[in-house]
Amino acid sequence: MDKLIIQGKEILKGTINVHGAKNSSLPILVSSLLSEESLSLFNVPNVDDVNNMITLLKCFGAKIRKNKKQLSINCKNLKNISADYDIVRKMRASILILGPLLSRFGNAKISLPGGCAIGTRPIDIHLKGLEKLGVKFEIANGFVIGNISNKLVGNKIKLPFPSVGATENLIMASVMAKGETLIEGAAREPEIEDLCKCLISMGANIDGLGTNKISIQGVENLRKARHRIISDRIVAGTFIILAVMTNNKLEIKNVNPQHLVSLIKILLKMGANLKTLSKSIIVYPSKKINGTKVKTGPYPNFPTDLQAQLMSLMSISNGKSQIKETIFENRFMHVSELNRLGANIKVNKDTAYIHGNQTFKGAQVMASDLRASVSLVLAGLSAEGKTILNRVYHLDRGYEKIEEYLGHIGAKIKRKKT
Ligand code: UD1
């Protein structure tokens, strides 16, 4: 297991390019299962979750060619096997293959998924939605097994909560279902719009992109297509928070600022000095950063995936802050580790109370999930002395070689194999 050795208080400067979105790439890679024709993708990030998804799709017979610029995937000759536990347990997004496999084969068997240890994360919304399209499910021996009698049939589906994964699964299942599907209460995350755009270029008929009411007219088959993945708004947000924390001037490039409105609003309220351009955000040093109150929520509200990073900033801001986490239970595992570095945070149920004005001081810490790990990297870079971050594999799931990325702007981070 690798560890990172982070030297704090280095001056960071220059520009940093944000890579493609992991959370777009995963469903878009999966969408290739629907088609017998090739899909060429650009701006796919080289992160472990994406590489795991590629391994999973290869198990089903997908032919994948990849170079630095482009990834081509062809699913003409697929075999419908039961999805392997060893891959599925690593990544909750594996459940996304359920809809496309049912659409293609009429049956599917997938090991119940794993992923980050953040709450119970059930899949009931996925299953209930797919049942509306005619699927019968049973759960046996740790597998979810789905069958349809003939073809998926479009229907009206009302989601009880705007689950990102369930919305994506249902969109993919409906693209070639018979007739019309209407998904109400759908999630509106930009990655879902990106998936819809890719499916449309493959020949799907989808309306209501970016809204909570998505309608899909089933089509007979899909065609060859090319698609460029959007940039990763969570990675961009992480680097913006880093620049504010270290009080350096940094330009974060290859960003869609429209996807970061909730973060920008909060940072401006806290006193950050930001300039928003069409495809980049420049962070300038600021006089004083003050604490504030934030609540996470489904897009366009503040993303739970930036909660840990913002908490790191709040720990060294002036005065008190609060973060209420409404998406996941148990998503405060970074708190004890931030406290080891000198933060003063207390948690009561779904709310973290952050007493600001603290100074981070380097220590040994442990990564517990993807976003928790990066909040510790941010703390380490603004700390006095050296921080050692253990269990870096969590970080590698969603950030391309962070030590090299941040090394370009002056960060001193070394990876040590243990
Ligand atoms: C996606 C993102 C993840 C992000 C999350 C919320 C990907 C690959 N991952 O995860 O980075 O943190 O959205 O923005 O895109 N739930 C149920 N039943 C279900 C499905 C979900 O109760 O069937 C609950 C979950 O336990 C969780 C909440 O709904 O508490 C949100 O989950 P969901 O929106 O589905 O997140 P993911 O798609 O897993």
Image (cartoon, rainbow, N blue to C red):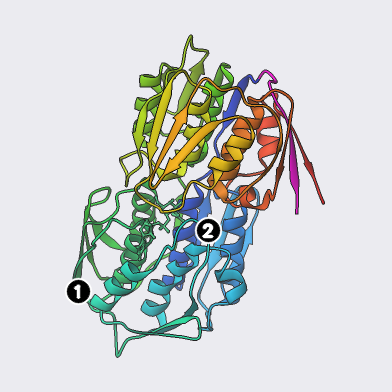
Residue 240 locus on image (x, y percent) = 50, 28
Amino acid marked by disc 1: Gly
Find numbered disc 1 in the image and state the secondary structure of the residue it sits on: loop
Residue at screen point 70% across, 30% down? 362
Residue range corresponding to the magenta coloring = 1-11
Q: CA distance from mark 2 to mark 1?
A: 38 Å
Amino acid marked by disc 2: Ala
Residue 157 locus on image (x, y percent) = 20, 67
Residue 136, compared with residue 219, is above or below; it is below
Is 249 magenta? The answer is no
Residue 265, compared with residue 146, is above or below; it is above
Crowding at dot 2, Cα within 10 Å, few <14 / some 14-19 / many 20+, comes out as few
Residue at screen point 31% across, 67% down? 125
Specify which label sits upstream in the sequence, 2 or 1.
2
Based on the displayed image, in which of its 4 quarters is residue 262 positioned?
top left
Identify the residue position indicated by label 2 in the image.
Answer: 117
Identify the residue position indicated by label 1 in the image.
Answer: 179
